[in-house]
Amino acid sequence: MKNIWQGLAQELEDAKAAALYRSLRIAEPDSPALNFADNDYLGLRFHPRVVAAFQKAAEKYGTGSGASRLITGTTEIHERLEKKIAVFKRREKALMYGSGYLANLGIVSALAGEKDLVIIDKLNHASIIDACRLSGAELRVYPHKNLKKLEAILKTSARFRRKLIITDSVFSMDGDLAPLPELVSIKKKSGALLMIDEAHGTGVFGENGRGAAEHFGVEEEIDISMGTLSKAVGCLGGYAAGPAVLIDYLINFSRPFIFATAPPAAMAAACLESFRVMEEEPELRRKLWQNVKLARKEISGLGYETGETESPIIPLLIGNEEKALNLSVRLREKGILIPAIRYPTVSKGKARLRLTLSARHSAQDLNSLFTAMRQVRELL
Ligand SMILES: *Cc1c(COP(=O)(O)O)cnc(C)c1O
């Protein structure tokens, strides 16, 4: 017994020595303005209408949901939210999960098994990788956005029952976009299904904030669209959207949907209100993009390396883990919260600070950010 705990303690010591140790930090809500780290891109987490919808539904339905969706956990609010998501995503139907992570596990493990092939981008989110492993399907990975390699993999895939290409639509640590139109034409030629993860696309991209698929004009061509309700939507949960038969199949065979307690009705009510606010207040998205444009210009002007970002996610590429940590600590001393992102979230030697913009940031917030970044730039 003692040896087992000692072994774990040794691994933690090794992580510390490599500047890869992680610990929890309390994030107080009183100074959200200086938070340049979260994914609340539109500031909806604190929107009065969203908070009020949550409170009102909690009064009526309680805090929990009591059981899984198939037992007694489904309310009329869940169904209204799912209809809303389906319309918003231009798909026939949608299904809510407890989180985006669970949605990925639930969709991929239901659709793919031993006879199937899943093909993913090297920089896809960890929840997609875990989902593929859980499914038991054959897993192939192509280098980031390397479509030639993807096509080569598909050429030798005749023996598989189903083929599923999965990609983040907006890559979460680099902020660049997947080439969705090209992926659509590849999947059509090969008979594979295309699934996209719009965790960082929904609410942010497209004329109406419907996601990167709207931005590229390919919404109707996406077989499975999944996303989270925890980022721009400002709440907690995940969803799958696609043809009615897919949703029916998930209700019957998706284990993370079947064997988990339903997300509370109050959460579904808050999500529903969020989608309405997104539609009724397009100025939030305009403000977000104004902030993004200004920040990109200022930050690259200061000499930071920001890679190929096309989104509100701006990576400050550092490389060395200790250097990244140090920069993050110095910024924090100046009142700016931008945590260092290290292995295994990104590869070893690719450490970075991941800065995100939100509609809730004021001009003054941005000035404080730029001032602090100017002061610490000698650490680069
Ligand atoms: C955050 C994220 C998820 C997981 O969503 P949660 O709702 O946080 O569980 C899935 N995919 C991507 C690309 C993400 O960035």
Image (cartoon, rainbow, N blue to C red):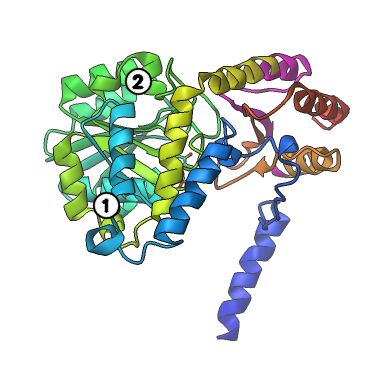
Quadrant of the rendered image containing residue 141: top left
The residue that appears at 75% across and 24% down in the rendered structure is 366
Q: Amino acid at mark 1?
A: Ser
Q: Nearer the viewer, residue 82 or 344?
A: 82
User: Which residue carries the number 1 mark?
Assistant: 135
102 displayed left or right of 31: left
Q: Is there any visible trace of residue 309 in the rendered image? A: no
Picture quarter containing residue 117? top left
Q: Which residue position holds label 2?
A: 180
Indicate left or right for 223 with 77 as reference: left
Picture coordinates of residue 296, whole percent (x, y): 67, 18
Left or right, 6 with reference to 238: right
On residue 61, which mark appears? none
Specify the quadrant that holds the C terminus.
top right
Please, what secondary structure does the residue beneath circle 1 have?
helix
**Dividing the image into 4 quarters, which one contains the N terminus?**
bottom right
- Pointer 1 with pointer 2, Cβ within 8 A: no
Q: Which residues are magenta?
A: 295-321
